């Protein structure tokens, strides 16, 4: 027999998978939704046994019952689960669950609200006319919730219905002006505070302004005694409005609530928890909270708050009927902080027993002007039990009814309680659960980036690492012995911090040993942000070239600027790809001309990084970069309009999971002669100036394995006289006039245009590293890892390391057939990573770098 008390109704608990999961012969992607009954969940965490690590759930997609590790489940409210279920892609579903802003907008949306709707990759204005299921009634536990939108303005006639779906009318509009779609395709236009209050009241009376809404702090009188409380429900009976209030006694532990102020779902959760506690054994509820490893901190807090409310009223009034229904005119709305005696110190809001004098003194200290902290400072904060978190100050100022100066901090980890909002107002932007508001004098400078306390790191080597002042001397790239002397060793290169490896590896590759993109540091481009340019030059590139070391704080300073200018809140903490960083800084922030100018089908286009796209080809087992570039250009009918100074090439791989080739040979020189538009080219048979190009001959095994196939007139005639090649259709090449005259005089030698490889970015298990060629020899390679080692534990810092890797020459000198047979696990040193994990190759033209 179960010792669980009976539930009034057996509700369902919904969850989303945050990681892929295999169960038997089935495979469930992250983003799948599942559920179990609340009774089943509680049974897992009875007081008799230890907390369970697994939970038996039912998958919504196929109704299969599986047992899943609690560590990869996140709870989802039922209303939110309905909206998420409407998104077909699992990965997209998980993204919108984690991102939260769009989902919260969907949860608050009401018919009649103006929105922007994505139709065929464009956004058009519209009005929400319907929110709900568009499927016929079924026995399903949960049905997807869609939005029915009437498109307006430029969106008219871009819809697919008149408000009906499969014969059922959900709203009325003009033909082809209605559309049904999930919330992921909608941008919700923020509504006013009054509108938000009206949304919670129901469909009727939305035109009437109601002064109090669910979650508001209110005051009222009970037996002529002033009492404070929280509005749990707002409703109307006839023409009269009432507020269902949960009174609050001064003895109630509000410090625990301080972390979550402003979240109305907490208030609603407390109301439900109070109802449940009044029906059950209080001891059971407390044990449930202690043993529950899955409920989010918000849900756990609801039960604890409810328990506190329940006990205080049971003791003082001897009743469990703690709600009071009060006429609206007898209720006065107040600020929620007006009855919070003191914030708990757990999240940095002063000391629990701090006196008024102490508060005043600490407040003055925080404003004294001696604090070095400002917006974008990297700080550490001590939480409960001495635990520390680190982050970046995003906002400084004063919050309503709090006298002390406050800091809004974006944390490095999901240990916060907000996305930058306080009581419904946004003060800064960050990812959900990354934001925290604390007293400014509770913040300390992040010691990890102030000094390097370990004696083993030979501090003398880095004491001069201050940022160069504006207008200071610029330093040239490091080559040969100078590169080895300055860059080699531990605590060398660019220090990694908080998923920065993509940027560390890219910056080290682009600037340590070459000047090909030094124009980024000096030239006043059309959109050039001089602040970003100055940080890049004075805080990163010059220190790297002068002393071989760049602190993580300098890179973080750049990441903060990219976050502000790029309108992306995750550049300071999330994993990115190098091309995402390079496109942002080159195109949107500095505004430099595209590094590549390409032509296809008569259309010219520019880009900064070139992604190789090609079908899997059986004859290519271990290709080199030359072969991949040629085949990609040929399959896409591309030509280079001009010789690039820097050619950045992404390999045919997608993320860390899929690689088209297990091994790729670096081409130390990339011959682009035949890839140039309207450039003289050499007949691949006789060496004369070519007049015709044949794409069908490219794969003919009679010819060489590399190089595009172009011929002079006589050779083309001879080649295409063969029966297997008669159907080929050679294309005429444009020959510059001076070469036509040279050809008639017998001066037909065509110059070759070649680029040299100067760096390779590699990725393995989500971590980027780089190889840089610092000298002319095949053995002149160095390997850089911004997080090669670590000093200290969680509050320590990464140790970047640069090592020489001459063993690479051994493999570059091997014949291709022999190299193809080399087993990666048997390769010396870090050579395996260069040949097997290549993500991006960087080539340069030294002569063009002089002009661009």
Image (spheres, rainbow, N blue to C red):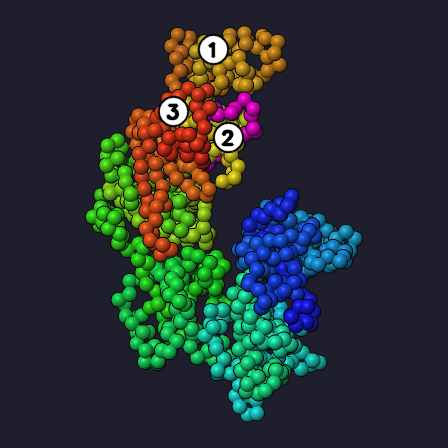
- 815 displayed left or right of 39: left
> Image quadrant of residue 427?
bottom left
Q: Which residues are magenta?
A: 606-627
Q: Residues within 10 Å of mark 3 (few under 14, many from 20)?
A: some
- 683 displayed left or right of 786: right
* Disc 2 element: loop
x%, y% of residue 369?
27, 67
Q: Which residue is mark 1?
A: 685
- 238 displayed left or right of 231: right
x%, y% of residue 533?
33, 46
- 236 displayed left or right of 378: right
Does residue 557 appear in the picture of this structure? no
User: How far apart are the alpha carbons under marks 2 and 3?
Assistant: 18 Å
Find residue 140 and name its label: none
- Tell me what residue is drawn at x 41 percent, y 36 percent: 761
Find residue 812 and name its label: 3
x%, y% of residue 453?
26, 54
Q: Which residue is mark 2?
A: 661
> Image quadrant of residue 27?
top right
């Amino acid at each position: 027999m179960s010792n669980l008390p009976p539930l009034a109704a057996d509700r369902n608990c919904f969850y989303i998978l945050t990681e892929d999961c295999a169960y038997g012969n089935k495979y469930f992607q992250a983003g799948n939704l599942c559920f179990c009954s609340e009774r089943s969940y509680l049974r897992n965490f009875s007081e008799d046994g230890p907390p369970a690590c697994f939970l038996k759930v039912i998958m919504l997609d196929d109704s299969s019952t599986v047992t899943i590790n609690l560590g990869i489940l996140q709870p989802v409210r039922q209303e939110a689960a309905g909206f998420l279920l409407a998104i077909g892609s699992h990965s997209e579903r998980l993204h919108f669950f984690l991102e939260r802003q769009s989902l919260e907008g969907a949860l608050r949306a009401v018919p009649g609200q103006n929105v922007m709707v994505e139709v065929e990759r464009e956004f058009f204005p519209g009005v929400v006319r319907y929110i709900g299921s568009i499927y016929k009634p079924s026995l399903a536990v949960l049905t997807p919730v869609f939005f029915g939108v009437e498109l307006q303005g430029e969106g008219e006639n871009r819809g697919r219905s008149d408000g009906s779906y499969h014969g059922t009318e959900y709203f009325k509009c003009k033909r082809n002006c209605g559309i049904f779609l999930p919330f992921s395709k909608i941008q919700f236009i923020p509504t006013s505070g009054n509108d938000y209050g009206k949304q919670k009241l129901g469909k009727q009376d939305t035109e009437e302004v109601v002064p109090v809404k669910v979650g508001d702090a209110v005051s009222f009188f009970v037996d002529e005694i002033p009492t404070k409380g929280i509005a749990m429900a707002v409703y109307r009976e006839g023409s009269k409005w009432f507020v269902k209030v949960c009174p609050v006694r001064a003895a109630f532990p509000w410090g625990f609530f301080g972390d979550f102020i402003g979240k109305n779902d907490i208030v609603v959760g407390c109301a439900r928890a109070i109802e449940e506690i009044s029906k059950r054994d209080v001891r059971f509820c407390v044990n449930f909270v202690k043993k529950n490893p899955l409920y989010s901190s918000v849900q756990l807090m609801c039960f604890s708050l409810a328990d506190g409310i329940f006990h205080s009223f049971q003791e003082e009034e001897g009743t469990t009927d703690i709600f009071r229904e009060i006429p609206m005119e007898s209720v006065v709305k107040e600020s929620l902080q007006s009855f919070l005696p003191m914030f708990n110190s757990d999240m940095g809001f002063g000391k629990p027993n701090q006196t008024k004098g102490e508060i005043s003194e600490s407040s003055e200290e925080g404003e004294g002007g001696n604090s070095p902290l400002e917006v974008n400072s990297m700080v550490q904060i001590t939480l409960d039990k001495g635990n520390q978190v680190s982050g970046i100050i995003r906002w400084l100022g004063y919050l309503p009814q709090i006298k002390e100066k406050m800091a809004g901090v974006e944390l490095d980890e999901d240990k916060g309680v907000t996305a930058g909002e306080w009581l419904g107002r946004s003060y800064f932007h960050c990812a959900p659960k990354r934001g925290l508001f604390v007293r400014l004098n509770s913040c300390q400078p992040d010691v990890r980036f102030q000094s390097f306390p370990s004696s083993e790191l030979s501090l003398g080597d880095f004491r001069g690492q201050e940022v160069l002042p504006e207008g200071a001397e610029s330093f040239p790239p490091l080559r040969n012995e100078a590169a080895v002397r300055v860059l080699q060793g531990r605590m060398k290169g660019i220090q990694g911090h908080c998923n920065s490896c993509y940027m560390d590896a890219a910056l080290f590759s682009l600037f340590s040993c070459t000047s090909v993109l030094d124009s980024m540091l000096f030239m006043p481009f059309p959109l050039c942000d001089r602040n970003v340019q100055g940080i890049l030059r004075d805080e990163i590139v010059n220190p790297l070239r002068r002393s071989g070391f760049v602190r993580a704080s300098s890179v973080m300073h750049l990441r903060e600027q990219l976050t502000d200018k790029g309108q992306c809140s995750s550049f300071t903490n999330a994993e990115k790809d190098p091309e995402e960083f390079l496109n942002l800084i080159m195109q949107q922030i500095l505004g430099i001309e595209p590094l590549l100018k390409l032509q296809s089908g008569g259309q010219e286009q520019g880009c900064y990084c070139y992604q190789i796209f090609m079908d899997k080809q059986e004859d290519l087992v271990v290709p080199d970069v030359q072969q991949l570039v040629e085949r990609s250009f040929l399959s896409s009918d591309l030509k280079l309009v001009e010789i690039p100074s820097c050619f950045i090439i992404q390999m045919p791989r997608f993320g860390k999971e899929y690689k088209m080739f297990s091994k790729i040979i670096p081409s130390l020189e990339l011959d682009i002669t035949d890839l140039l538009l309207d450039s003289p080219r050499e007949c691949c048979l006789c060496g004369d100036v070519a007049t015709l190009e044949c794409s069908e001959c490219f794969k003919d095994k009679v010819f060489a394995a590399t190089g595009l196939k172009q011929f002079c007139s006589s050779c083309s005639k001879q080649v295409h006289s063969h029966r297997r090649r008669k159907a080929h259709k050679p294309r005429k090449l444009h020959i510059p006039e001076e070469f036509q005259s040279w050809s008639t005089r017998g001066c037909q030698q065509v110059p070759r245009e070649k680029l040299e490889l100067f760096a390779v970015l590699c990725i393995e298990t989500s971590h980027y590293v780089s190889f840089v060629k610092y000298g002319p020899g095949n053995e002149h390679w160095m390997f850089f890892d911004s997080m090669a080692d670590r000093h200290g534990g969680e509050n320590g810092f990464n140790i970047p390391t640069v090592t020489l890797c001459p063993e690479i020459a051994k493999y570059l000198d091997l014949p291709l057939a022999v190299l193809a047979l080399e087993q990666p696990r048997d390769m010396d040193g870090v050579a395996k990573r260069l040949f097997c994990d290549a993500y991006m190759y960087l080539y340069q033209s030294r002569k063009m770098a002089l002009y661009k």
